Amino acid sequence: MRRKFRISKFGFRISDTALLSGVPQIRNPKSEIRNRIDWLGEFFISAVAFVAIAIIFLIFIYVAREAAPLAWRTIDGISIWSPFQPPYVWQPVGGVPKFNILSLIAGTFKVTLIAMLFATPLALAAALYTAEFAPPSLREWIKPAVEVLAGIPSVVVGFFVLIVLASWLQDAFSLQFRLNALSAGIGLAFAVIPLIYTVSEEALTSVPKLYREASLALGASKAQTAIRVVLPSASPGIFAALVLGFGRAIGETMIVLLASGNAATLSLSPFVPVRTLSATIASELGEVVFGGGHYRVLFLIGVILFIITSVINWMGSRYNRRLRQRLFGTA
């Protein structure tokens, strides 16, 4: 009897038209069912990933579509270049509305930089202590305690800054304005610290134990090993954490909406009120005329926010790839 092997999509069997004689047909129903389940699981995961990516693109397309009419026609005296021309003031309500967004961009970056200046050293120090110096019993308490901050709603953090922190800063430093970029940046740091801490701590703990043992065997102390060996080895992961934290800070809305003062000013001083891109969209989109110039400008702000975060993530990804290649010889 002539038989041959045939591999099907969901299993392995022998057909009746082959070169094997006297071998009965081999079938494994359990294996076929398992293969079908694996295929369905792979299909489901792929479908969910595709839908998630498609939703992100559709959101961006919708926002860009609402802002697109400014590119080829003037609406209520506003063209696509009006938000970038002087006077550099954001006053959408008045006899002569002004829609310049440069002050909003400057306020967004000022608050974000203040938040990163506060959050980065605290988060990295906590991650380094947890990964290298804390005893295991204490580590089990520190990490969950820091990560609990990530579960606190941003509106609660903003309310705390508005009622407590802003008044304390004004009294401590005799500030003219109670709500300013400094108070908003410190409040924003509370939202960024858990993200930077979590990713950095995972990067530090993923450094091979052999690196630490080799450093200690050469006579280095535990502190020298942590700072000169473990920290540089984990630098790609730490840089990724900083990029994620920066993107999180730029897109934050409720904290800056409550604690920044919401005054669109062009100033380098951290002690004056500011207004950010995301806070402007949140506070004004519900009150504008549908399809009007103000409405289109707010969607243009959304496009600019998308572009800023995308460029930052792209630049961070490229630098992280080069850093990995320089440290480990692979991307």
Image: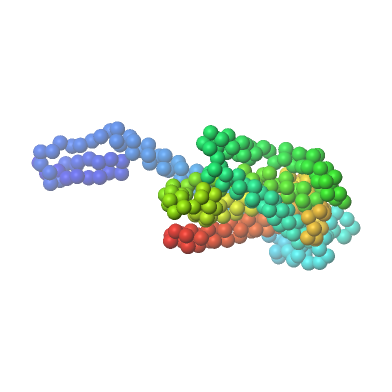
Q: Horizontal placement of 16 versus 61: left or right?
A: left
Give the answer, above or below, for where 46 lies relative to 298. Answer: above
Residue drawn at (30%, 44%), measured in percent from left and top? 9
* Residue 178 drawn above or below residue 79: above
Q: Quadrant location of the C terminus?
A: bottom left
- Residue 231 pos. (x, y %): 53, 53
Task: Please provide percent x and percent y for residue 116.
Answer: 67, 52
Q: Is residue 91 left or right of residue 8?
A: right
Asked whether residue 105 is in view, the answer is: yes
Count numbered badges in the picture.
0
- Residue 142 in percent (x, y) is at 59, 37
Q: Nearer the viewer, residue 252 or 235?
A: 235
Q: Image point 54% across, 49% down: which residue? A: 223
Q: Is residue 298 visible?
A: no
The residue positioned farthest toward the front in the image shown = 219
Please tell me which residue is depicted at 19% across the width and 44% down the height of the picture: 5
In front of the other: 208 or 151? 208
Give the residue drawn at x 80%, y 50%: 180
Q: How is the image coloured?
A: rainbow
Query: Which image quarter is the N terminus in?
Result: top left
Q: In the picture provided, is 303 more to the left or to the right than 55?
A: right
- Residue reaching furthest right? 95
Residue 275 spot, x, y in % from top left: 78, 53
